[in-house]
Each structure stands twice: as C-alpha cells, then as structure tokens.
C-alpha cells in the first residue's frame, strides 16, 4: 500500500476476554488500555504513565430496544451506526467506521508483522486475523496522510483458541486514530451475551490502585510483605491485590509518536464527535 509495513507498536492482551483485559504496549512496555465489565456495561480506558484510568467509552451490550450502544463524550450512539457492516471483495464482510476525518474499514486478512508467536498461525490460515485500513478521507480532511490511497492502520488477532495470544499491531498512519481502532476492534469481535461470562474481578478504582502500585514498584495498600500491618497509601486508594495476580499479563505497549516523548494519543473523535480527556 505504499507505507511502512513495520508496526509502530503492538498491544498484547493480558487475558482471553477482550471485555476484561489489559492491552500491554511493547513500546514502551506498559499497560496502555484496559477494559472492565460490570453487568452489561464494558468500559474502555486508557492507562496513563502513572497508572490512572481515563475513560474512552462505555459500551452497553443491552441498550435501548435491544440495540447495543456506545457512550463517548456524552454522545450515545448505536453500535451499528459506529461500525457499519457491508460486503467486500468475494462477498466477504467488511466493517466501516469514521475516525475523525478518515473513513476506515476492518476486513479479514493476513499479516506477517505480528509477533513471532502469532505470525505462523496467521499466515497458516489457522487463526482469524483482521486488517484495518483507511479507505477515503472525508470531505473535511486536510491531512496529507488521507489522500484517498488505502493505508494500513492495524492488524488484529482477537482472542481465540488457536492463537497463542491476542494481539493488536498498529502502524504509523494509525497514530491519530488509535482510540478508534481499539474501540472498534472490541465491537468487531465481541459475541452476543459475551459480557455475561466476562465480569471483572476488580472494580475500576481497585484496578487503578493496583496499576499505580505496580508502576511505583510498591505493594498495594494493606498488603504485608513481612507479615506486619501496612497503613494505606497517601492517595487513600482501595486495597486490591496486584493486577498481575488478577490478570495474566504478558509484557507489551502504547504507541509513541515519532519525535515525541509522550505515549498518550492526541484528542480523537469517535465518528465525528470530539472526545476530551
């Protein structure tokens, strides 16, 4: 497609449930996104460098009139209006969405630039792999990267029995729309009623406290290392066990834009709606 085939970053999922997992970045190596599920609601979070959870979107799998809905920046939308299904080449299904000023689509495919543990599986047609690419810019686009030429944005091996691990590889052109890619990847592969068996053991507050404790290199509040009582931490967070004891967490990563030092993506839109953190 004319662009670099080397991923900008890879996110490895810490569990087999995309509704209750950490997306572990490999560059730098730290949790970058998280999902938590309570009842029929799944929340997608970004994870700051200090372990703070920042809400991206809330997905209600049992929404109005039986339609799943997504709440982002105060705007409530139906899932089918965010991720629109159509038939592509050879009648294979594709799923289109708008990310800021760029029209994108997910389609099934192969990609050889996932981690070695997944590449053999994907190229051997054993596992399912989804490819995300830009299609055409919207009429409001002014970006030089949206000139109508399809560009590779991401490759995704979702949680599945035949894949060694679930993984999302993102490419340089995806930097401004990574939040959209992660959200639509979740909507793309989640089965109906999957939320019923994907309830999170940790609350949002407990997970955040655990992540902060791990980043600080300390044990969470009230956790003894020598059998003696420990007082709570100064920020008065709940007393969870470390996330590594609740979730299986392989090491992985958040994208860093070339020439910057921050791992946090810039303000994006879901569809045409701005999101402010």
Image (tube, rainbow, N blue to C red):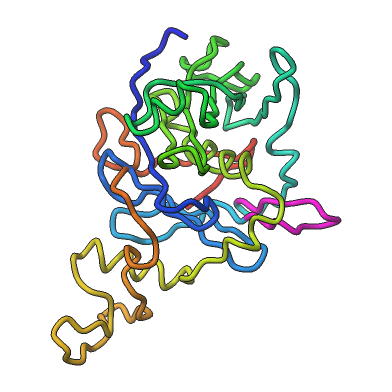
Percent coordinates x, y for residue 44 in the rendering: 52, 53
User: Foreground: 21 or 76?
Assistant: 21
User: Foreground: 100 or 60?
Assistant: 60
How many numbered circles are shown? 0
User: Foreground: 111 or 263?
Assistant: 111
Residues rendered magenta in the picture: 59-72
In-image side of 217 versus 8 (left or right) = left
Is residue 157 rendered magenta in the image?
A: no
In-image side of 45 versus 63 (left or right) = left
Percent coordinates x, y for residue 215 in the rendering: 24, 61
Q: Residue at x 49, y 41 (%)?
A: 179
Percent coordinates x, y for residue 185 in the rendering: 56, 39
Q: Quadrant of residue 206?
A: bottom left
Q: Residue at x 42, y 50 (%)?
A: 33
In-image side of 177 versus 71 (left or right) = left
Q: Residue at x 64, y 21 (%)?
A: 138
């Amino acid at each position: 497609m004319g662009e670099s085939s080397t991923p900008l970053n890879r996110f490895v999922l810490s569990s087999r449930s995309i509704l209750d997992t950490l997306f572990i970045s490999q560059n730098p190596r730290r949790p970058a996104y998280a999902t938590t599920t309570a009842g029929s609601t799944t929340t997608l979070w970004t994870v700051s460098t200090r372990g703070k959870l920042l809400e991206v979107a809330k997905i209600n799998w049992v929404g109005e009139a039986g339609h799943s809905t997504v709440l982002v920046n105060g705007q409530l939308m139906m899932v089918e209006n965010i991720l629109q299904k159509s038939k592509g080449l050879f009648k294979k299904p594709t799923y289109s969405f708008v990310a800021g000023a760029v029209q994108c689509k997910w389609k099934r495919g192969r990609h050889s630039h996932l981690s070695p543990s997944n590449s053999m599986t994907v190229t051997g047609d054993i596992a399912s792999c989804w490819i995300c690419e830009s299609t055409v810019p919207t009429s409001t686009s002014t970006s030089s990267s949206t000139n109508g030429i399809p560009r590779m944005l991401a490759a995704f091996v979702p949680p599945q029995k035949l894949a060694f691990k679930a993984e999302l590889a993102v490419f340089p052109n995806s930097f401004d729309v990574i939040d959209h890619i992660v959200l639509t990847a979740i909507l793309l592969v989640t089965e109906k009623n999957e939320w019923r068996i994907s309830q999170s053991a940790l609350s949002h507050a407990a997970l955040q406290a655990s992540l902060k404790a791990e980043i600080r290199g300390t044990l969470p509040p009230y956790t003894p290392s020598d059998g003696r009582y420990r007082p709570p931490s100064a920020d008065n967070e709940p007393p969870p066990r470390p996330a590594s004891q609740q979730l299986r967490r392989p090491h992985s990563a958040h994208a860093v834009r070339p020439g910057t030092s921050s791992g946090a993506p810039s303000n994006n839109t879901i569809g045409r709606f701005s999101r402010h953190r």
